[in-house]
């Protein structure tokens, strides 16, 4: 049987994604939609994330992505690797060290930095997490702690689709 | 109770809330869809798990409650998200969020505000997420405080 552990130093990388204007707006409109919680999608007031003129009036060269998009893409990679365990007791912190401008191509990554036995046979992973641009420059950095009950290695190899003849 | 006109007026020690609310499956699915998190525990169940990142939006709920005039003329810029998850949160659960301004400080000519948010299940006062949020209150230069 395969060792279910991810060794210290193992790096997980998601497929690159372009931070389009649409992706920025999807997040912006979530803010009033979640607050209203009335079964309808609401449109936000102009922000530095979706309105060029407003962003320029605030001293920015153009719109920038809300940092929480990067954080959620990091969480998404952790869920791909660790499943629902990424939502159970643990921790995630992210620091936005450089703005993400329109059409920047981001790659989300995580590296295992520690591994110890948790409770009930689970494994407690510590990870460095980050988003980098196409030149490998880190724009968001952070850390995560996850108590894993399943095999992250097996999940990482699992196909995302099935084929039947 | 209002603690300031704008969110940029918040001072160290200000308490925001508490506010009580539930997150419907609709908003959890919309939030996850908007962030391209198409995992089955969000989209293919009647009672989705709530991603811990949604705690950030509870800060905005507390802002609305505490600062009726909203953000004000200057755009905030989010600089740090720091959440510790104590238990699973699910849609439909009655929740209580309380915020406290932990710090307001100046660094490199910009004013930062750090808010700590405690999210609990109303039933049993069970801790769910502890969150520390750090923002620059005005990105535009020239808005720095003494």
Image (tube, rainbow, N blue to C red):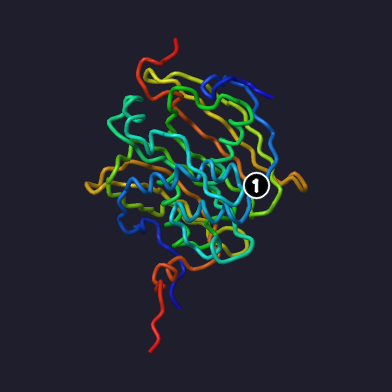
Q: Quadrant of residue A57?
A: top left
The image position of residue A38, as x and y in percent, is: 62, 48
The image position of residue A24, as x and y in percent, is: 38, 44
Q: Residue at x 45, y 78 (%)?
A: A1
Question: B146 above or below A74?
Answer: above
The image position of residue A27, as x and y in percent, is: 44, 45
Q: Quadrant of the N terminus of chain B?
A: top right
Q: Foreground residue, A48 or B48?
A: A48
Q: Residue at x 46, y 35 (%)?
A: A45
The image position of residue A107, as x and y in percent, is: 31, 52
Q: Residue at x 51, y 40 (%)?
A: B82
**Chain letter for mark 1:** B
Label 1 crowd (10 A; few <14 / some 14-19 / many >=20): many
According to the picture, the residue beneath numbered tag 1 turns out to be B128
Q: Which residue is drawn at 77% across and 47% down?
A: B124
Relative to B52, is A53 on the left or the right?
Answer: left
Residue at the extreme bottom of the image, as rendered: A165
Q: Is mark 1 on a helix, strand or loop?
A: strand
């Amino acid at each position: 049987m395969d060792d279910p552990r991810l060794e210290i130093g193992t790096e997980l990388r998601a497929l690159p994604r372009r931070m389009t204007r649409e992706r920025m707006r999807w997040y912006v409109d979530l803010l009033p939609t979640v607050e209203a919680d009335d079964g309808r999608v609401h449109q936000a007031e102009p922000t530095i994330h979706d309105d060029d003129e407003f962003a320029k009036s605030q001293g920015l060269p153009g719109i920038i992505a809300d940092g929480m998009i990067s954080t959620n893409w990091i969480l998404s990679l952790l869920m791909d690797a660790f499943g629902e365990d990424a939502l159970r007791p643990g921790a995630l912190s992210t620091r936005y060290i450089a703005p993400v401008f329109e059409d920047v191509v981001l790659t989300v990554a995580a590296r295992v930095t520690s591994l110890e036995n948790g409770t009930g046979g689970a494994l407690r992973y510590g990870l460095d997490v980050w988003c980098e641009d196409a030149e490998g420059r880190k724009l968001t950095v952070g850390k995560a702690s996850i108590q894993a009950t399943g095999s992250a290695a097996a999940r990482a190899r699992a196909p995302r689709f099935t084929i039947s003849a | 109770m209002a603690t300031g006109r704008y969110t940029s007026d918040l001072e160290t020690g200000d308490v925001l809330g508490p506010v009580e609310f539930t997150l419907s499956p609709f908003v959890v699915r919309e939030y996850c869809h908007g962030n391209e998190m198409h995992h089955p525990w969000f989209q293919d169940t009647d009672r989705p798990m709530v991603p811990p990142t949604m705690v950030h939006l509870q800060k905005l709920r507390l802002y609305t409650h505490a600062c009726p005039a909203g953000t004000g003329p200057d755009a905030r810029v989010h600089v740090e998200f720091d959440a510790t998850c104590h238990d699973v949160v699910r849609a439909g659960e009655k929740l209580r969020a309380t915020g406290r301004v932990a710090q307001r400080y100046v660094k490199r000519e910009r004013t930062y505000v750090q808010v700590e948010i405690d999210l609990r299940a109303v039933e049993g006062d069970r801790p769910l997420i502890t969150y520390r949020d750090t923002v620059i209150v005005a990105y535009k230069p020239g808005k720095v405080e003494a």
